[in-house]
């Protein structure tokens, strides 16, 4: 399972007791699963492009590149100074 499937599984699991106690049939639970999955994937389909645009924005991209650069420099210094 990917993280995406775990997310929808968690949502459905939290609703499962309510569905069972309300007398939902197996078909009704399957329909609920299908509807929740559709809604969950729709949210992802809308959110991912927006997140991509945000991460490609010049200021955010510069910050990410700066942090990555500092991390690589720090790792390089650590490797250069460690004893063999």
Image (cartoon, rainbow, N blue to C red):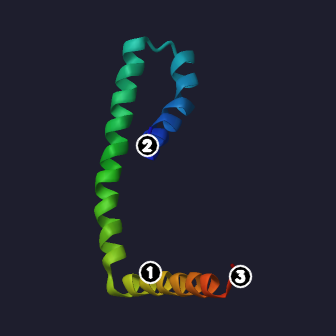
Q: Which percent across, then down, holds residue 49?
A: 28, 63
Q: CB under 8 Å between callouts 3 and 2? A: no
Name the residue that disc number 1 marks. Answer: 64
Name the residue that disc number 2 marks. Answer: 2
The residue drawn where x is 30% and y is 47% is 42
The residue drawn where x is 53% and y is 37% is 10
Name the residue that disc number 3 marks. Answer: 83
Mark 3 or mark 1: which is in front? 3
Helix, strand or loop under label 3: loop
9 and 14: which is toward the camera: 9
Q: Is residue 36 above or below residue 48?
A: above
- 40 left or right, relative to 73: left
Within-10-Å neighbours for mark 2: few <14, some 14–19, many 20+: few
Gap between marks 1 and 2, in whole Å? 25 Å
Mark 3 or mark 2: which is in front? 3
Q: Which percent across, then down, holds residue 9?
A: 48, 34
């Amino acid at each position: 399972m990917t993280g995406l499937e775990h997310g929808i599984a968690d949502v459905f699991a939290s609703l499962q007791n309510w569905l069972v106690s309300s007398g939902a049939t197996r078909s009704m639970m399957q329909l609920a699963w299908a509807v929740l999955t559709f809604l969950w994937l729709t949210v992802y389909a809308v959110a991912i492009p927006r997140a991509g645009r945000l991460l490609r924005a010049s200021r955010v991209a510069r910050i990410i590149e700066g942090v990555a650069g500092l991390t690589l420099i720090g790792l390089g210094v650590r490797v250069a100074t460690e004893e063999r």
